[in-house]
Image (cartoon, coloured by chain):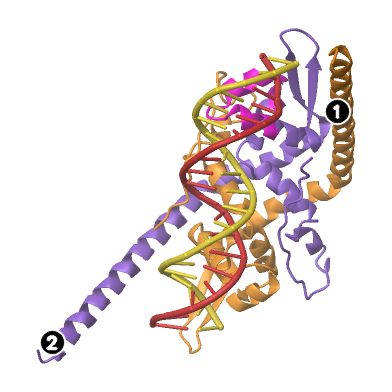
Chain colours: A orange, B purple, C yellow, D red
Amino acid sequence: MEDGTSTSPGYRCDTAPGQDGFDYAHWDAREDCEVRQILDRIADKWSLLVIALLERRCLRFTELLRMIDGVSQRMLTRTLRHLERDGLVRRTVHPTVPPRVDYELTGLGATLHTTIKALVTWTEEHQAQIARARADYDLRAAAEQAEAERAAADREELARLLRPR
Amino acid sequence: MEDGTSTSPGYRCDTAPGQDGFDYAHWDAREDCEVRQILDRIADKWSLLVIALLERRCLRFTELLRMIDGVSQRMLTRTLRHLERDGLVRRTVHPTVPPRVDYELTGLGATLHTTIKALVTWTEEHQAQIARARADYDLRAAAEQAEAERAAADREELARLLRPR
DNA sequence: CCGCATCCCTTGGGATACTG
DNA sequence: CAGTATCCCAAGGGATGCGG
């Protein structure tokens, strides 16, 4: 049956929740945290893609399989089941032969898609900044490591000179 | 050095991107997809919590360690390094003894936090709906399975009766 | 055509112990 | 105090093959 509750720990909050109008109970990482559950759902490897594609139009299983490059049948099935269970996607089985199954976004799924778009937009707007930050960081890290290695070599050299054979 | 690019496949798009004003290239799951990278970052087990806590005020390493229940030193370090590399968090080392390291959200990190809040709000508003959908689904699934088992038992019984000893 | 079951490998992440 | 290094386990996810 497999429910969506993953066992993950939480956080201690020593200040009253909501003092700044923000409920930190929902940021909790414990298994009973809704945000964690939704995030785990949309953060998995394929859900986003599926939602994005279904938002454009209703699709069949095989269509999704073809459109999403690299997904396995197993994972597409699992992803769709999860989304269906959460009420984000509606699954319609046509009792024909060969069988035909249609998937479409529910109203709930559509609102989620809208919300996610905000994140996508944020990413588009700031990806350059992030790329720069990463380049900076990597450069700095490389420099520091080189420095450390140089220092280590110096120390070793010194030790060798001090050891009177 | 470990960069943040995970090797994951993408998706084939047979329609022109942006025809509905939405760039599907950014929904790509391939390694060079920015959305995927950011999502992987914020979706990991601790980043969200760290960002949420740092948004309130600047914190030291140990403070975070204590506030986030269940996190290990190793994971907290990793999480902070990732966030720092992406320019979301600023790390300040005070050359005192014992050492003291402060972490604070950058401007970029603050905007991300704002964006994420939208997702949290969505979750709060729709969690009841999701819970209902799940209960429905589980009920239905259980019923279907029971039905299947009953049918199987019937078939077996029939076969037993037809087999003339 | 759609999906489940099995096997197997890779990755995320926890526990513990050690350094500056 | 603030990490780093090592080990180890469990979950995620791919490949393949069977069943309705």
Q: For the N terminus of chain B, give its image quadrant.
A: top right
Circle 1 Cα neighbour tier, 10 Å, few/some/many (<14 / 14–19 / ≥20): few
The residue identified by callout 1 is A149
Q: Image height check: is A77 above or below D7?
A: below
Residue that appears at 58% across and 35% down: A27
Q: Which amino acid, by three-letter code, is at mark 2? A: Leu
Residue B66 colored in magenta in the image: yes
Which labelled disc corresponds to residue B141? none
Residue B70 colored in magenta in the image: yes
Between A56 and A99, the one nearer to me in the picture:
A99
The residue identified by callout 2 is B161
Q: Residue furthest front?
A: A165
Between A130 and B147, the one nearer to me in the picture:
A130
Stretch in magenta? B54-79
Image depth: mark 1 or mark 2 in front: 1
Chain of the residue where label 2 is placed in the rendered structure: B
- Horizontal side of A112 relative to B38 (left or right) equals left
Q: Which amino acid, by three-letter code, is at mark 1? A: Glu
